[in-house]
Image (cartoon, grey):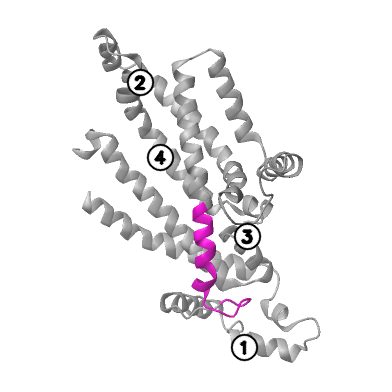
Amino acid sequence: MGRFIIRRLIMLIPVLIGVSIISFLILHLAPGDPAELLAGEDATKEDIMMIRHELGLDKPLWIQYFMFLKGITTGELKSLKFSMPVMDVIKPRLFNTLELSLASILIAVIIGIFAGVASATHRYTWIDYLSTIGALLGVSMPVFWWGLILILIFSVELGLLPSGGMGGISHLILPAIVLGTASTAIIARMTRSSMLDVLRQDYVRTARAKGLLEKIIIYRHALRNALIPTVTVVGLQFGYMLAGAVLTESVFSWPGVGRLLVEAILFRDFPVVQSALLIIAIMFVLVNLLVDVLYAFLDPRIRHG
């Protein structure tokens, strides 16, 4: 297991290099000049050229890329918009996105697994049909539309929850539900499919023949094996939440990395965008590594293989 983890961590290096190169090239090929935004509307061409020279934007792309790598490894890389170290800009936003993503994946796991097990154990009943319809709706609904509907109901009409911003738990409920809805549906369907396969296994029939209670068979024996493919989905969904919370954070004015990326892209703040993408890539790979490690605890065949 130790060697496996080390190999995966080594594989992280080319992934990060690839992400840094792609994000660097895409941003620099996009139209717009950060020097013009910094200089203002009344700036002369000389002023813009001076700012470009100070920022190193007049150098060849390959030199700018190595300047970026040097800056991010030494901590000297600064935001063009905020004029402060990039990590000081990203760090508080990153913790906010982590808080939202953890709350969302917790909701998705609890409801998704419960709905999937209930659907599999009550196949072709109203519970199964209700779970299927709910999953289809969860996957199909646009995030921004679902968020606005919840704001209209719980904030505007009922006045129970705040419509946006960051504060206590009450501010977290609506964005966490919105961000976790699609993941809930995917986890529920995966759990249902996996649970149905497990319930057909011989050891389940043997447990029933021995007279074990159905709840013990389902939750102690069948569910553990059924969760193996579900863990993969949970890990991927959590990674997607970290990287794809832009719409949710925008709808609810949540000060996370998603909103920061939008602001940085509009301002052409290259250092912030590139650094944020690298951090998201690191977290995505680490989450998938954690998922692979969890396999060993869920399936003894992997641990002893």
- Classed neighbour count for the residue bearing mark 4: other residues with Cα under 10 Å, few (<14), some (14–19), many (≥20): some
Nearer to us of marks 1 and 3 is 3
Up the image or down, 174 lies above or below 43; here it is: above
Q: Position of residue 114 (x, y in %)?
A: 46, 28
Q: Earlier in the sequence, mark 4 or mark 2?
A: 2
Q: Which residue is mark 2?
A: 218
Q: Earlier in the sequence, mark 3 or mark 4?
A: 4
Nearer to us of marks 3 and 4 is 3
> Tag 3's secondary structure?
helix
The quarter of the rendered structure image containing the C terminus is top left
- Classed neighbour count for the residue bearing mark 2: other residues with Cα under 10 Å, few (<14), some (14–19), many (≥20): some
Instruction: Give the label on residue 53, or none.
Output: 1
> Tag 2's secondary structure?
helix
Instruction: Give the label on residue 232, or none.
Output: 4
Report, in whole angstroms, how far the alpha carbon at label 1 lies from the one at label 3: 29 Å
> Tag 4's secondary structure?
helix
In the image, taking residue 143 as reference, residue 257 lies left or right, namely left
Q: Which residues are magenta?
A: 79-99
